[in-house]
Amino acid sequence: MHYNNYNFLHVDGSDEAESVLQDNLSEFAASLLAAYDSGDLVAALEEGHTGWQKWVKGFGKSLKRKVS
């Protein structure tokens, strides 16, 4: 598995990495990169704190994750 030229396979055996990898890291990363590529993430950042909060909440809901 590679994201931004970082090889996650070499950390795959560690206990810390295992829980992250088992928690759909690839789905999260693909969704985050898609949001960046589409311009949604950049637009939210340009809106400031409120835009960022709204984007994070929507992103979490789209991945079916609890967002506080």
Image: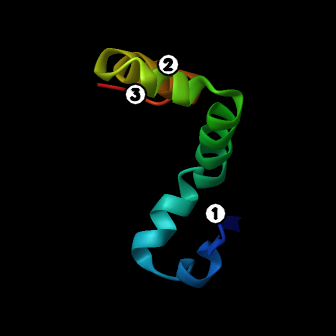
**Amino acid at the residue labelled 1:** Asn
- Which residue: 58% across, 53% down? 25
Given this view, does label 1 or label 2 mark the residue nearer the observer? 1
In front of the other: 53 or 17? 53
| Label 2, label 3: how far apart the Cα atoms are | 10 Å
Please report whichever mark, 1 or 2, sits nearer to the chain's N-terminal start.
1
The disc label shown at residue 66, or none: 3
| Helix, strand or loop under label 3 | loop
Q: Quadrant of the C terminus?
A: top left
**Amino acid at the residue labelled 2:** Gly
Q: Is residue 47 above or below residue 23?
A: above
- Horizontal and vertical percent for residue 44? 47, 22
The disc label shown at residue 4, or none: 1
- Horizontal and vertical percent for residue 30? 68, 45
Say left or right for 53 vs 65.
left
Given this view, does label 3 or label 1 mark the residue nearer the observer? 1
Residue for badge 2 = 58
| Label 1, label 2: how far apart the Cα atoms are | 24 Å
Res. 1 image quadrant: bottom right
- Horizontal and vertical percent for residue 23? 53, 52
Residues at badges 2 and 3 in contact (C-beta under 8 Å)? no
